[in-house]
Image (tube, rainbow, N blue to C red):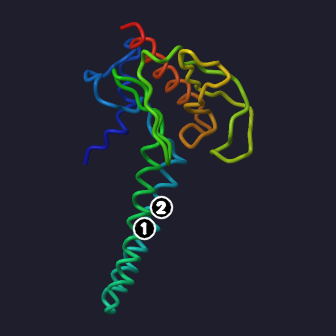
Amino acid sequence: MPLPFLTADRAFEAADDVALPFDDHERWRRPYRPGPWRVGMAALWLLLASYVLFAAVIIALTGTLPGAAVVFGIALAIIVSALRLLRAGVWVSARGLRHVGFFLTRTVPWDQIAAVRTVQQPVRWLGLPRTVQGQALMLVRQGRAADDAPTLMTTHNADFLARFAAFDRAADAVEAWAAENRRG
């Protein structure tokens, strides 16, 4: 079974001299692999969902179908949450930059982007309230102050915790997409 999200790093490693190594620039893609923390949490959620689905089958076999439907709905909610967690991150295409969060997705066309830059600042550790010193990829929109720039990804989020080289490659890839598409 092909797993297209695993091919992102290989494409950038194979074509270091090419800024945008993909043929189809219209397709939304994440220019990096999801990190081990994100994949591990999604795997744990899917494991929990398998137990809940098994419980739904047991409940259905005992004859209480409304109860089984409720438990099955809970399992579906867990599965959707795991898939949404895997989908979160920064996605790029020729149309713009898309920041996918767990609850909210924001898409910004390239012509509204003034800069995409890496800055050194305190960042949240795995999205928790605790902050540590790290790097963040910031999106500066045209007509807005640099202080109002949203953080796209950090060195301490679920994709890049303890993977500084992967963060640098991903930040360079997003910056390359921004530079190439803001020119054209």
Residue 94 image position (x, y, % from top left): 34, 21
Which residue is farthest top? Answer: 183
Residue 67 placement: quadrant:
bottom left
Residue neighbourhood size for the residue with mark 2, other residues' Cα within 10 Å, grouped as few (<14), some (14–19), many (≥20)? some
Q: Is residue 131 above or below residue 46?
A: above
Look at label 2 and name its amino acid: Trp
- Name the residue at 60% across, 40% down: 157
Say which of 98 and 163 sits in front.
98
For the C terminus, which image quadrant? Answer: top left
- Name the residue at 42% across, 67% down: 49
Look at label 1 and name its amino acid: Ala
Residue neighbourhood size for the residue with mark 1, other residues' Cα within 10 Å, grouped as few (<14), some (14–19), many (≥20)? many
Residue 42 image position (x, y, % from top left): 47, 55
| Residue that carries the numbered disc 1 in the rendered image | 49
Q: Secondary structure at mark 1?
A: helix
Q: Is residue 86 above or below residue 15?
A: below
- Name the residue at 74% across, 40% down: 131
Residue 30 image position (x, y, % from top left): 40, 33
In contact (CB < 8 Å): disc 2 and disc 1: yes
Q: Is residue 98 above or below residue 161?
A: above
Q: Secondary structure at mark 2?
A: helix
Q: Which mark is residue 132?
A: none
| Residue that carries the numbered disc 2 in the rendered image | 45
